Amino acid sequence: MTDGTTLLFGLPGVEVERVERLADGTRVVHAVTAQEAAAACPSCGVVSTSVKARVTTSPRDIPYGQDRIVLRWNKTRWRCREDYCGRSSFTESIPQVPARARTTGRLRTQIGAAIGDAARSVAEVAAAHGVSWPTAHRAFITHAEVELTEPKPTRVLGIDETRRGKPRWERCTETGRWVRVDPWDTGFVDVAGSQGLLGQREGRTGAAIIDWLRERTPQFRDVIEFVWPSTPPRCTPRRSARQACFPTRRSWSITSTSSSSATTR
Ligand SMILES: [Zn+2]
């Protein structure tokens, strides 16, 4: 295939061999690895020349034009011949598609930006890009971690629980018993200032709050005077977080910015 096709496809680390159109109109891009570093053993770093097998994977990629394309990446499984290395073989990977990744980096970037910057819902973006909800959510978390910097201290910390997805039943792999999974996230917001969302944690437990607070600086924790809202639906996580992170305080004032009355918990 011409260099122009590889150039047009534009996925760093691979070279397009050919493009075919299936009977249903799907365009399939057959690509091979075009990065010498991909043959370097991830354990010892020595570049291998001993082929063990050829494998093909289909990481999901961004659409081209109106329709989606299917990427078939033909890559090599190499043997590592170094005596001191504990790894016997490894499959090629490139920065755009690391080991075990089922999507390209540029697709994950696009999904993360669609959710984080364009404020589209995770479910809608997942459907639009043909990936599962957890995959889209992970892309968003990665995007947010790059965008979010260490928050500045705030006098009033908002703690807000948000349900993500419907409750479902799952069988525990250890006990074999069915358990109800009720997915929630805890968000931390700057209520006194203009920083907006400061961070987010999976779950709505005291541990989720404690973990997040402990990752902040002592100065950040010292500045907090109030926690909002004044009538949280569940106070126990906040109370256990206060006891864990502010052991010298007898109360952690919980107040409302719209009212001067403060309630202590
Ligand atoms: Zn090795």
Image (cartoon, rainbow, N blue to C red):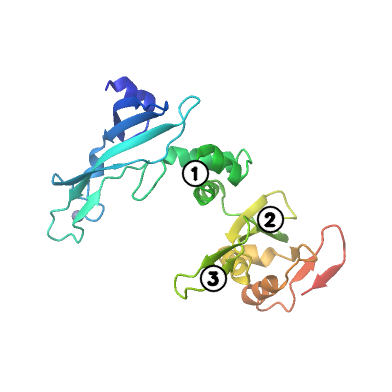
Badge 3 amino acid: Trp
Residue 95 is drawn in which quadrant? top left
Badge 1 amino acid: Val
Which structural element holds mark 1? loop
User: Who comes first in sequence, dot 3 or dot 1?
Assistant: 1
Would you name the residue on which mark 1 appears? 131
Front residue of 144/61: it is: 61
Q: Is residue 25 above or below residue 223?
A: above
Q: Quadrant of the C terminus?
A: bottom right
For label 1, the crowd category at 10 Å Cα-Cα, with few meaning under 14, some 14 to 19 and many 20 or more, is some
Residue 261 is drawn in which quadrant? bottom right
Q: Quadrant of the N terminus?
A: top left
Would you name the residue on which mark 2 appears? 189
Which structural element holds mark 3? strand
Q: Nearer the viewer, mark 3 or mark 1?
A: 3
Q: Residue 25 placed where, x, y %? A: 42, 25
Q: Which mark is residue 100?
A: none
Q: Residue 41 placed where, x, y %? A: 22, 51
Front residue of 172/118: it is: 172
Q: Is residue 174 above or below residue 197?
A: below
For label 2, the crowd category at 10 Å Cα-Cα, with few meaning under 14, some 14 to 19 and many 20 or more, is many
Q: CA distance from mark 3 to mark 1?
A: 27 Å
Q: Marks 1 and 2: CB-CB under 8 Å?
A: no
For label 3, the crowd category at 10 Å Cα-Cα, with few meaning under 14, some 14 to 19 and many 20 or more, is few
- For the point 37% across and 33% down, which residue is it? 11
Q: Residue 122 placed where, x, y %? A: 59, 46
Badge 2 amino acid: Val
Which structural element holds mark 2? strand
Q: CA distance from mark 2 to mark 3?
A: 35 Å
Residue 236 is drawn in which quadrant? bottom right
Would you name the residue on which mark 3 appears? 178
- For the point 41% across and 29% down, which residue is it? 26
